[in-house]
Image: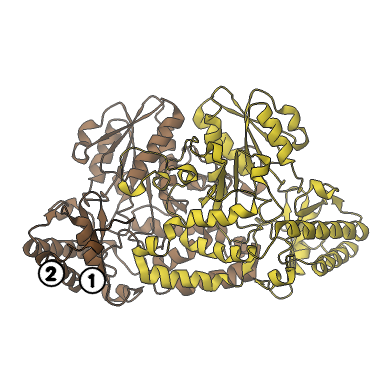
Chain colours: A yellow, B brown
Amino acid sequence: MTDFLATRAQFHIPEGVIYLDGNSLGPLPRAAASRIAAMVEDEWGEMLIRGWNEAGWMHQPRRVGDRVARLIGAAPGTVVMGDTLSIKVFQALAAALEMRPDRQVILSDTGNFPSDLYMAEGLCALLDGRARLKTVPPEEVAGHIDERVAVLMLTEVDYRTGRRHDMPALTAAAQAAGALTVWDLAHSAGAMPVDLAGADADFAVGCTYKYLNGGPGAPAFIYVAPRHADRARPALAGWLGHAAPFDFEHAYRPGAGIERMRVGTPPVIQMAALEAALDIWDMVDMNDVRARSVELTERFIRGVEAACPALVLASPREAALRGSQVSFRHPDGYAIMQALIARGVIGDFRAPDVLRFGFAPLFIGPEDVDAAIGTLAEIMEGALWDRPEYSRRAVVT
Amino acid sequence: MTDFLATRAQFHIPEGVIYLDGNSLGPLPRAAASRIAAMVEDEWGEMLIRGWNEAGWMHQPRRVGDRVARLIGAAPGTVVMGDTLSIKVFQALAAALEMRPDRQVILSDTGNFPSDLYMAEGLCALLDGRARLKTVPPEEVAGHIDERVAVLMLTEVDYRTGRRHDMPALTAAAQAAGALTVWDLAHSAGAMPVDLAGADADFAVGCTYKYLNGGPGAPAFIYVAPRHADRARPALAGWLGHAAPFDFEHAYRPGAGIERMRVGTPPVIQMAALEAALDIWDMVDMNDVRARSVELTERFIRGVEAACPALVLASPREAALRGSQVSFRHPDGYAIMQALIARGVIGDFRAPDVLRFGFAPLFIGPEDVDAAIGTLAEIMEGALWDRPEYSRRAVVT
């Protein structure tokens, strides 16, 4: 049984803050600063170039990949870290598309994170007519899987609404139609159990700065099913994905299995922060996380609907259809969120009208949920958001 | 006049080490650890998600890009940080190629860093016959520039030999033939003055963990000439290169100018280390760096040739044709380098037989050169490398 008081004690949460935005950027693990300092001073400082071998920097993307693999139902040796999520989307998509040379369509949904769609668009433009991106509403995806679809590219949990796709069912439907799948786990990894192997997913990608708490700019990950790993051709053919990077051959030969999805030099300092976060994940059972997450999101929906009738639920009401976030709509959503943040309850806003609240059980408990509901109710009852300083729109990430 | 005693004092060099491998991984700036700690604790820890705006993380890739721009002869607003060098090569190459739709050839040289060639190969495979990579010996590049060449892609300074291409002349020749240029500055940035604007270069890319001392995994940079910046189409169409990333539009619209070369979330922690290094660069005039670098490399060549006749110079003898490194060949190069490293003189080895020594004036002085020559002479005279522990080949980066 996961001890959520113990996990919470591992994070630094600023005094007076209730942090419901761990779905955007997870908070600082208490051990991260000293972990990074040790890496910087003892490894970079003392080992210099030898750190690549002696401190194991060169193999870190695989070693850390194995730690992430456990959290997403992937076997050791099937996940590697590096780059950003957008780059990993491109890699997975390019490889998958090439494995279906007689098909043209990348099928996705209009709720997918825009960068995934943009990367697909950029790839299609490069391929100059060879492939095209088709987006349909999230609820209609299943109905559009047909023999023209080369790749089904979906984000499991919708970044705005928290709506969750049925990964096993859609993967099976895609494969039955002869298509491959690319799953983006940005809002799944660390939010709930994911079973990539069980769902028989083909490719998956994700980031580590949200629920996994790896820090701003933490590296992304990519998963390739073992049956494809030695066949997938890397479009981004970087030297660290070469079969023998230090032989400096003139021609590219892809590395074995998941190694070929490496591109350039890994972000060693960011990786130290991520490793501190993964130490906390070692204390955690994902099934316990899910049970707690459902408890927290149900409690929040019940409380907000009772206390704030003007807010309209934008997330699925049924827990099984949601990730670990809850969204509400209100025409003054931006100002309401600013008023909340000014009172220490940090969620975020997504245009045009979505208030987004993430519930990360590792550091959020029922008492936080109740306090957040109370603050939100006060703001709504007193129309406290209706002040000029809350309505000035700035960049919100 | 740059004070090289002052710059040297800004770095941590381990006791007993003469570090001639700053061309592979620069040493730790003394201020880096506290700079990173402040970023991690005060920004990530306290600001949480608000750090993107309040600490300026979102604009850091441009702000830091401007600091790098000064060192490579580029105007403010023409350089942006992110990803790895291999990814930046791909971006520059894809954009340049698209601007020459009627031409097929990417011309490069056999001395180019393999990852640049691999990325070009990967891009050509994606483009399925639309383009092909042609490599010729470094000395023969000029003779192969013709009306079939779409892009001339070169690394200014050869990673093994230190041989330097004539950037202004080759750029002019390429442009006279109607081609565009992509210059890789991996071994130039921070090693010697680069004048991208003066040379009228089209695209340039580079890394920041070598002479710039940004730390292992530090982000790369990309430069796009202002005349191309609003026309270059991003093949890696990530959301942070979008004209309005936080509007979450469904279709990609490239951002203004160099902004469009951003892809995903920037590595904020790595960037803090790089900023500490760039503070040191603010004390430096690149012309002084070059003068000192020539003095050091001349001294090293003279000394080694006098003391170690078995070593054969692999770098150009004329300083104007070299970067800031000197390479020698010897059949037992690997073991010799291991013997040197065991005695605290750290250079590196590149297959099959190249001993590589980098001279970074910010922390290397004439007394280091003399000491390194002395140690190397001892090893060569006594055949001290001929021991089993030095010949075991491990991964060397």
Read off the residue under disc 1.
Answer: B343
Sort mark 2 into few (<14), some (14-19) or many (20+) by Cα contacts within 10 Å: some
In front here: B378 or B116? B378
Q: Secondary structure at mark 2?
A: helix
Please identify the residue farthest to the front as the structure is shown.
Answer: B388
Q: Is residue B38 among the parts visible in the rendering?
A: no
Quarter of the view holding residue A70: bottom right
Residue B267, percent from left and from top: 52, 58
Which of the two discs, 2 and 1, labels the residue nearer the N terminus? 1
Q: Label 2, label 1: how many angstroms apart (C-alpha)?
A: 11 Å
Instruction: Name which residue lies at 21% across and 53% down.
Output: B354
**Label 2 amino acid?**
Glu
Residue at label 2? B378
Q: Is residue B225 above or below residue A192?
A: above
* Residue sitting at x 75%, y 62%: A338
* Quadrant of image for the N terminus of chain B: bottom left
Mark 1 burial class by Cα count in 10 Å: few <14, some 14-19, many 20+: some
Mark seen at residue A391: none
B326 sits left or right of B257 in the view: left
Marked residue chain, label 1: B
- A4 above or below B72? below
Question: In the figure, is residue B355 to the left or right of B304?
Answer: right
* Dot 2 and dot 1 residues touching (CB under 8 Å): yes
Whether labels 2 and 1 share one chain:
yes
On the rendered structure, is B188 left or right of B54? left
Label 1: which secondary element? loop
The percent coordinates of residue B287 (x first, y second) are: 25, 61
Image mark 2: chain: B
Amino acid at circle 1:
Arg
- Residue B246 x, y percent position in the rendering: 65, 49
Q: Tell me the quarter of the image containing the C terminus of chain B.
A: bottom left
